[in-house]
Image: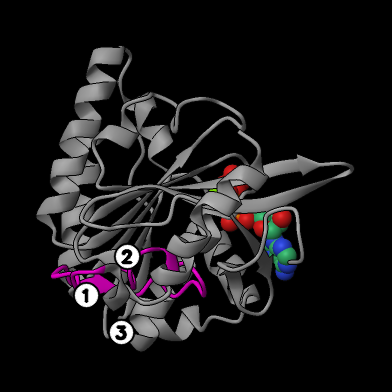
Amino acid sequence: MAFGEIEEEEEETTTQLTDGEELGKPSQVTRVRSGVPGLDDLLQGGIPRNNLVLITGSCGNGKSTIGMQFLCHGAQYEEEPGIYLTLEEPPKQIIENACHFGWDVRGLIKDKKLNVVEPELYKWESLVTTIEDSVMEIGAKRLVLDSATILGMYFNDQYKIRRSFMDLSRILRRVNCTTFMISEREEGANKYSVYGVEEFVVDGVIVLYFIKEKNMFMRALAVRKMRSTNHSTKIYPFKIAAPGGIKVYPSAEIFGDV
Ligand SMILES: Nc1ncnc2c1ncn2[C@@H]1O[C@H](COP(=O)(O)OP(=O)(O)OP(=O)(O)O)[C@@H](O)[C@H]1O
Ligand SMILES: [Mg+2]
């Protein structure tokens, strides 16, 4: 379907989504603000508290940035401490990248409002303990797991991989945090994750795209699923810039005026 057709069909819905109260019945769900300008407008005001949300996209799409932005906002402005569990990049690099966007990561870590934790790789039991202990230590309310894709390497058959994702989702729910589980996705693929199971064990899926238009790529984002939420189904442009990080443009067109 052409982008133009989608825009026309859903123009009215998008306008209403800027105010959750206008959607008919006010939502009973408690929501947390993501800290990403424009994103909460697509989600009736925010992500349902304690939901597990998959952030999926291809390389360099902003997955780690959106994760850290979500945690820094929670820690700085919402009294919600956060844990960043990094399974790929070393904590030092994660912290340096985040400082580049102007977030006071080191100050938040010093004040025990944020922690960047590197679990021991290839030890499933140790991963579970690290999640539980680090959440307890600072009373975390937000959690980012970057990335879940590497967990597939813990196991050597598809059945065990699928089961591990089911177990992981149960563990992440048990710690009562609003969680971003980051996953890789091949650009243009018709599934939302590497193993094809991640999107089914979560409450929400946010997809980050890199769309080719003539001689350049556009960054775009869509909410593919969000339980308990009358979310927008359009694809929206977003930008990454320093300072500030990610900003979504809910009223702009994907191939238009961002
Ligand atoms: N100051 C900046 N201004 C604009 N874009 C930036 C800036 N800093 C980083 N970026 C963009 O952000 C991208 C990296 O974002 P991020 O690390 O969040 O992506 P990712 O999806 O986690 O990548 P990976 O797949 O490697 O884990 C860079 O490739 C670059 O395009
Ligand atoms: Mg990353």
User: Which residue matches tag 3?
Assistant: 78
Looking at numbered disc 2 in the image, what kind of residue is underneath it? Ile
Give percent across and percent down for residue 167. Answer: 16, 35
Task: State which tag comes first along the sequence, 1 or 3.
Answer: 3
Residue 17 appears in the picture as rendered: yes
The verdict on residue 181 being magenta is no
Residue 144, horizontal then vertical, whole percent: 36, 57
Image quarter hosting the C terminus: bottom right
Residue in front for this viewpoint, 110 or 13: 13
* Amino acid type for the residue under numbered disc 1: Ile
Eye-nearest disc, 1 or 3: 3
200 lies left or right of 115: left
x 36%, y 57%: residue:
231
Query: How far is the residue under mark 1 from the one under mark 3?
Result: 15 Å
Tell me which label, 2 or 1, sits earlier in the chain: 2
Q: Are marks 3 and 2 in contact (CB under 8 Å)?
A: no
Residue 138 badge: 1
Q: Secondary structure at mark 3?
A: loop
Please name the amino acid that badge 3 sits on: Glu
Check whether the beta carbons of the residues at disc 2 and disc 1 lie within 8 A of each other. Answer: yes
Relative depth, front residue between 125 and 237: 237
- Mark 2 and mark 1: span between their CA atoms? 9 Å
Q: Is residue 157 depicted above or below 246 in this figure?
A: above
Mark 3 or 2, nearer chain start: 3
Q: How is the model colour-coded?
A: one colour
Answer left or right for 31 relative to 36: left
Q: Residue at x 33, y 14 (%)?
A: 156
Residue tagged by mark 2?
A: 83
* Magenta stretch bounds: 24-46
Residue 81 can be seen in this image: no
